[in-house]
Image (spheres, rainbow, N blue to C red):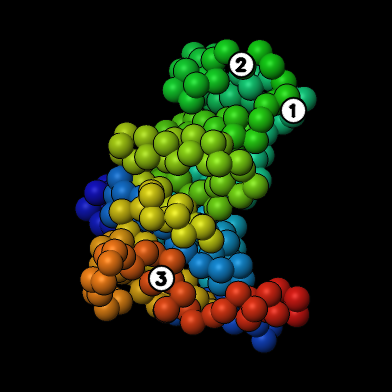
């Protein structure tokens, strides 16, 4: 639990619009401390907008949100001290080595022994052997692990991962998944946004499906699977997958999604 005994994240009736475009239409959910919460939705569903509000980069039009017990609108400074945000693309300095990136962030946070902090994180994220190489030479998965390691400097209580495996190859995705699991096991609350159904299925303690600006379902994987009829036994029993649940709730075909993207 947080310092006040509340959920690590609480969002109530959150709304956000850009002129006539209603991005968030009354979003409600809670995230338990030390858990992994996946916000699942298609492109344009409002995932990144919501994360930007929770990380104090945007102001909501209506509704309230607390992160680690602090009100996002009233106490943005306290929220920033409690969180870390990793965007869709790794924000590492490619001119610097992996170790130099970590040392730089530790110094910017005015922490003691930045070199020791960097070395501990390099070991934790299996980057020690590559610590002296420039980040420009890292693979996509290594850059993402370095990015997340940089985000953990200062021991934030809550970390936001906005589509953390976008553009990564399968092995790199698996590496990042293990990193996310390790974060939760060490007590960090993780809210990740994703459009990959298997990612939410593998990682999340709870999954919320965001569609057209609202949460249309929120539950554990088993709870979401129970929304569909039980499997009929013929020759092979097939339980509903998260993909089945998502498509049944959202009700969009691939063609409709392509038309939506083409109209933007």
Identify the residue position indicated by label 1 in the image. 136
x, y percentage for residue 255?
64, 78
Instruction: Give the structural element (helix, strand or loop) at label 3.
Output: helix
Residue at mark 2: 131
Disc marking residue 18 = none
The residue positioned 37% from the left and 64% from the top of the image is: 241
Looking at this rendering, what residue extends furthest in the bottom direction? 20
Give the alpha-carbon distance from disc 1 to disc 2, as whole Å: 12 Å
Residue at 38% of width from left, 72% of height from top? 245
Contact, CB < 8 Å: mark 3 with mark 2? no
Mark 3 vs 2, N-terminal side: 2
Q: Residues within 10 Å of mark 3 (few under 14, many from 20)?
A: some
Extreme residue in the front direction:
235
Along the line of sight, which residue is nearer the eye, 62 or 177? 177
Q: Measure the C-alpha gap from mark 3 to mark 2.
A: 43 Å
Mark 3 / mark 1, whichever is N-terminal: 1
């Amino acid at each position: 639990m947080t310092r006040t005994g509340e959920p690590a994240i609480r969002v109530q009736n959150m709304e956000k619009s850009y002129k006539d475009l209603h991005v968030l239409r009354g979003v409600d959910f809670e995230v338990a401390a030390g858990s992994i919460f996946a916000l699942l939705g298609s492109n344009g569903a409002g995932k990144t907008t919501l994360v930007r509000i929770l990380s104090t980069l945007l102001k909501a039009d209506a509704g309230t949100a607390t992160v680690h017990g602090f009100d996002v609108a009233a106490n943005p400074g306290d929220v920033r001290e409690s969180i870390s945000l990793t965007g869709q693309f790794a924000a590492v300095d490619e001119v610097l080595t992996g170790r130099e990136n970590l040392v730089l962030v530790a110094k910017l946070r005015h922490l003691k022994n930045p070199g020791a902090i960097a070395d501990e994180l390099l070991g934790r994220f299996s980057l020690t052997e590559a610590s002296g190489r420039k980040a420009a030479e890292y693979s996509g998965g290594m850059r993402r692990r370095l990015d997340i390691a940089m985000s953990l400097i200062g021991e934030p209580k809550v970390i936001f991962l906005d589509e953390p495996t976008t553009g990564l190859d399968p092995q790199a995705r698996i590496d990042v998944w293990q990193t996310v699991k390790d974060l939760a096991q060490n007590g960090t609350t993780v809210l990740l946004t994703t459009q990959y159904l298997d990612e939410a299925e593998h990682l999340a303690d709870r999954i919320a499906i965001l569609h057209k600006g609202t949460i249309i379902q929120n539950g554990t994987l088993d709870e979401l699977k129970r929304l569909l009829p039980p499997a009929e036994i013929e020759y092979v029993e097939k339980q509903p997958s998260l993909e089945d649940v998502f498509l049944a709730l959202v009700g969009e075909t691939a063609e409709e999604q392509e038309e939506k993207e083409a109209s933007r």
